[in-house]
Amino acid sequence: PSIELGPTYPIRNLKTMQDFYKEFDQPLLKKEHTILIDLKCFQSGVIVPHQGTDVWDQHHVKFPHLYPRPPSHHKSHAQPSRWEVTRRALLSLTKGSNSIGDVQTAIMSYNSSNKDKWTFDALYNYGQRLQTMDNNLHLLIPKMAKLALNLPELIKKPIPLLRQQQNQGITMSQQQISCLLANAFFCTFPHRNDTKPGSEYANYPTINFSSLFANKTDPTKLDLKAEKLRAIFHYFNTVTNDEEPAKPDGLVTFERISIPPSKLPNWNTTKVPLRNLHISPEGSIENEGTGMLQVDFASRFIGGGVLGSGLVQEEILFLMSPELIVARLFTEKLADNECLKITGPQMYSYTSGYSKTFSWVCPYDDRTKRDIWKRRYRQVVAIDALDFKNPREQYTKDNIKRELNKAFVGFHGDVKTAIATGNWGCGAFKGDPKLKALIQLMAAAVNGRDMAYFTFGNKELAKEIQTMHEKLTMKKVTVDKLYNWLKDFSAYYAREHHFPKDLYGFISEKIDHKASL
Ligand code: AR6
């Protein structure tokens, strides 16, 4: 039987960033906000890096050109510094005619301790497929190497690590991001290859691209990696292109937001009704949700498997918008009460398919309007759902509350754009979309925000969520009430071994019961 959806709240009525342009045009200078460019110059139209002093410590990104020289007693016999080795290797790549073998040799010259660990088979496979694709790698690699070498000139101020339980932001230019990513591509970031527990950066995502070049496990994944590399190389093509269309010349802001437990809502007593919901099986967060607060179905380690073999919502988003990848350089893994918000990233690619069917399609000409800081009216919030190895776990009181709080932190803020989301935590992480939809609606309501929900082709689910939302709003059910029903369901679920009622059946009975009181 065909599933007919009733009329849904019109998407054009949902608030986007342009409705809040005054807030986005506010001065950027704030406490706990590091700005890597000179704002005065920026306002008169030139991008100049903000001056600063060099640091090499545990609070800041360790730049490859600041790698300390090991102490040496015989100056004349001193080994070249690691940066000197890196610089020479990258310089040789700028001199044209670069095979993938040259890239490998360069990268391994300053990463020799990984010579038995790193392989480049995915990169070679990409190279072999080049004939049928956009074959300009020999022109692109020199430009990327030049860009990477520019690091000491382009970034003069230390980049703070965004560590757990700190509210801190960083704003940088798209050019600075491209330079950092070029360094990540050439695997120049020191101390970032060891991810073992207890190592210095064990709590951070990886940033050097070595894992993207390797394909140790599954040969069927080689071609998927090639599609990822197409997206990455297309990005580097755009940012190193001196001709029209102009190189990206705007800014992007990254903010870590931590809300202390004492400031989280008391879900038992929050008497607010649900807000408007636009729901549709068609459309996606990335396209239809542009200008709203777009939810990244994140990993605690921002970007998840984007540099490995992961290829679901978060990874695809990061491939369409590679500027997001730079967050991996400085964002410590997210705690339960934290999120990362990114304002102004650009879209570079159209992609199609999902997971095993993913492919890069063509360039995306991003015409999204910008605020006075030339940040695109695009905002992404990374919130990591719980990974339910056993889906039964998600109905416990503690886990429901954890997810409510996580969504609350993500949706918090003075700017009340609508939330663009979908089945958060319900793919790789095995959540129940019916529960997660309610959780997100409750978190949005407490923050005074409407929602656009895309069910990713699932009509039946769209219909069910829509009907549930209608019942709840018609009967003016408030968040505290719904929270208590979820707790009742949790107890019921723990008690019963067979489930005569699913979550929505259970809540519908509660609503009917409330109506008859
Ligand atoms: N727009 C709307 N809905 C979507 C989209 C989209 N673009 N893409 C997917 N969905 P998943 P998770 C739907 O598995 O469970 C990554 O590795 C679709 O129904 O990406 O939170 C991260 O790094 C899909 O099944 O999110 C984390 O490690 C569902 O959303 C982990 O996966 C969930 O998408 C997060 O897994």
Image: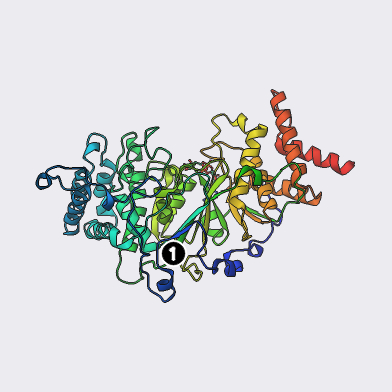
Q: Amino acid at mark 1?
A: Leu
In the rendered image, the vertical position of residue 146 relative to residue 39, given as above or below: above
Residue found 58% across the figure and 50% down from its top:
410
| Picture quadrant where residue 437 is located | top right
Secondary structure type for disc 1: strand
Residue 294 shows in the view: yes
Question: Residue lying furthest right in this view?
Answer: 517
Quadrant, the N terminus: top right
- The mark total stands at 1
Q: Residues within 10 Å of mark 1 (few under 14, many from 20)?
A: many
Report whether the residue tagged 1 is closer than 8 Å to ligand 1.
no
Residue found 43% across the figure and 72% down from its top:
40
Question: Residue lying furthest front in this view?
Answer: 73
Indicate left or right for 271 with 238 as reference.
Answer: right
Q: Which residue is under mark 1?
A: 251
In the rendered image, the vertical position of residue 51 relative to residue 221, given as above or below: below
Q: Position of residue 149 (x, y in %)?
A: 25, 58
Indicate left or right for 250 with 296 as reference.
Answer: left
Quadrant, the C terminus: top right
Q: Position of residue 277 (x, y in %)?
A: 68, 54
| Picture quadrant where residue 490 is located | top right
In the rendered image, the vertical position of residue 154 relative to residue 114, given as above or below: below
